[in-house]
Image (cartoon, rainbow, N blue to C red):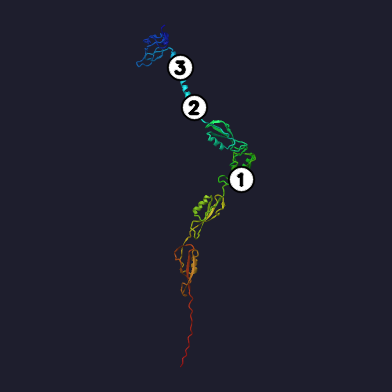
């Protein structure tokens, strides 16, 4: 039986591989001259069945065959020398790299030096003082609050690490600070009704007292806050002040008399008061539009939004002087009664038989003149003179002498 050492096939295997003797144009075996190993061969193979384009074709046995191309040398020998050289090279590279890395690390350690400081004893100092000291030393501060029956609130009574420890700059030191005696925790009663809050505090173990305070936002009767504040600790039976809202504080009427109405009304509004009726009054010597008085008066207390009545000045109304010349004195006074003028009279004697007697013959302000209320008006009234006295002289008698 012919053996194909280079392929590991015998004649029986040709059929299984899909090859027969007709499928090999030329097959030969060549021994390696230096070794004499018959397993190293050069096989020139060419398929007997392929299409003109060189694509895969089917041969006997149904096994697809792909063209192999040019000659291929198959080296099946072992090379222990080359393997040993490669292993040695890897070991040498590892040793050199480790040495270089160690030198770099040692060099870094020799050039970087972090100073160390000794932690002082901080018990009995306030948190502010202890933090300042540690900060000046370059150490960081962490705070841990704990209740303590002897240390006052805000006092340091412990530290980690302990005093005397040497730390690198930038290391954190924890200060244990007292937040007061353990006692009882004051409950949060804000928004409760005063009586309910007092009952809860009393049940907790405190002695509550209720106090009133004005507040513009919280409804009357509701708790504003407590003293000590909610969350604080206090001894059993300790007094707790409960501050209850008494509603908005009363407002004080501001002094707005003699101010212009725009300025005075604005000040009333800023004080939280309202504006009631506004009355006017004519005052001689005062400009119109000035506040004369308020009700309630300035300085009085009033609930928020209370309306304030205001009296302001107004200009005197303008009058047109009527004509009363020729009227009887009584008729002239009647005509001028509601005019707003101040009427005065002056008498002038006229002949006893003058028809103008008893009438107005002149007025100080001409008719049709526009004047203000209270302007004086003088009327001249004609007064008839007394009639002349007639004397009768008796006629003398005559005697005729013959």
Query: Picture coordinates of residue 173 (x, y %)?
Result: 55, 33
Kindly state the secondary structure of the residue where label 2 is placed: helix
Taking the spot 55% from the left edge, 30% from the top edge, the residue there is 166
Q: Counting other residues with Cα less than 10 Å from the Cα at mark 2, is it few (<14), some (14-19), or many (20 or more)?
A: few
Q: Earlier in the sequence, mark 3 or mark 2?
A: 3
Of residues 95 and 354, the one drawn nearer to the viewer in this rendering: 95
* Above-or-below relation of 138 to 275: above
Q: Say which label, 3 or 1, has the lower sequence index.
A: 3
Q: Mark 3 — residue? A: 88
CA gap, disc 3 to disc 1?
A: 94 Å
Give the vertical position of 402 relative to 48 (above or below): below
Rendered image quadrant of residue 74: top left
Residue 380: x and y in percent read 47, 69
Give how far apart the Cα atoms at labels 3 and 2 are.
33 Å
Report the Cα–Cα distance between label 1 and label 2. 71 Å
Residue 226, quarter of picture: top right
Counting residues from the N terminus, which is met first, the one under dot 1 or under dot 2? 2
Q: Secondary structure at mark 1?
A: strand
Q: Residue furthest bottom?
A: 402
> Which residue carries the number 2 mark?
110
Q: Position of residue 266 (x, y in %)?
A: 50, 51
Label 1 sits on residue:
211
């Amino acid at each position: 039986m012919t053996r194909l050492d280079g392929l590991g096939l015998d004649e029986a295997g040709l059929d299984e591989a899909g090859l027969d003797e007709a499928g090999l144009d030329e097959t030969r075996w060549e021994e390696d001259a230096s070794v004499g190993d018959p397993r190293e061969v050069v096989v020139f193979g060419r398929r007997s069945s392929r299409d003109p384009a060189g694509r895969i074709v089917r041969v006997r046995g149904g096994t697809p065959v792909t063209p192999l191309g040019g000659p291929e040398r198959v080296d099946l020998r072992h090379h222990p020398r080359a393997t040993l050289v490669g292993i040695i090279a890897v070991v040498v590279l590892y040793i050199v790299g480790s040495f270089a890395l160690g030198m770099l690390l040692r060099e870094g350690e020799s050039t970087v030096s972090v100073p160390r400081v000794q932690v002082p004893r901080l018990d009995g100092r306030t948190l502010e003082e202890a933090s300042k000291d540690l900060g000046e030393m370059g150490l960081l501060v962490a705070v841990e609050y704990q209740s303590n029956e002897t240390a006052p609130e805000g006092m340091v009574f412990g530290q980690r690490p302990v005093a005397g420890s040497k730390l690198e700059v930038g290391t954190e030191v924890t200060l244990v600070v007292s937040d007061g005696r353990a006692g009882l925790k004051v409950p949060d009663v804000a928004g409760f009704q005063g009586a309910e809050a007092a009952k809860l505090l009393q049940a907790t173990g405190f002695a509550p007292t209720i106090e009133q305070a004005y507040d513009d936002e919280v409804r009357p009767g509701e708790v504003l806050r407590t003293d000590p504040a909610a969350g604080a600790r206090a001894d059993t039976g300790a007094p707790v002040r409960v501050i209850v809202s008494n509603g908005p504080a009363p407002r004080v009427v501001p002094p707005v008399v003699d101010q212009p109405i725009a300025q005075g009304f604005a000040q009333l509004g800023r004080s939280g008061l309202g504006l009631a009726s506004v009355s006017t009054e004519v005052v001689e010597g005062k400009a119109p539009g000035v506040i004369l008085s308020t009700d309630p008066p300035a300085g009085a207390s009033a609930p928020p939004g209370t309306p304030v009545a205001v009296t302001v000045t107004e200009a005197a109304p303008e009058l047109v002087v009527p004509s009363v010349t020729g009227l009887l004195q009584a008729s002239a006074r009647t005509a001028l009664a509601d005019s707003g003028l101040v009427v005065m009279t002056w008498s002038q004697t006229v002949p006893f038989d003058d028809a103008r007697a008893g009438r107005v013959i002149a007025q100080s302000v001409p008719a049709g003149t526009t004047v203000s209320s209270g302007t004086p008006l003088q009327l001249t009234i004609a007064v008839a003179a007394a009639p002349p006295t007639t004397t009768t002289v008796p006629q003398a008698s005559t005697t005729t002498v013959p």
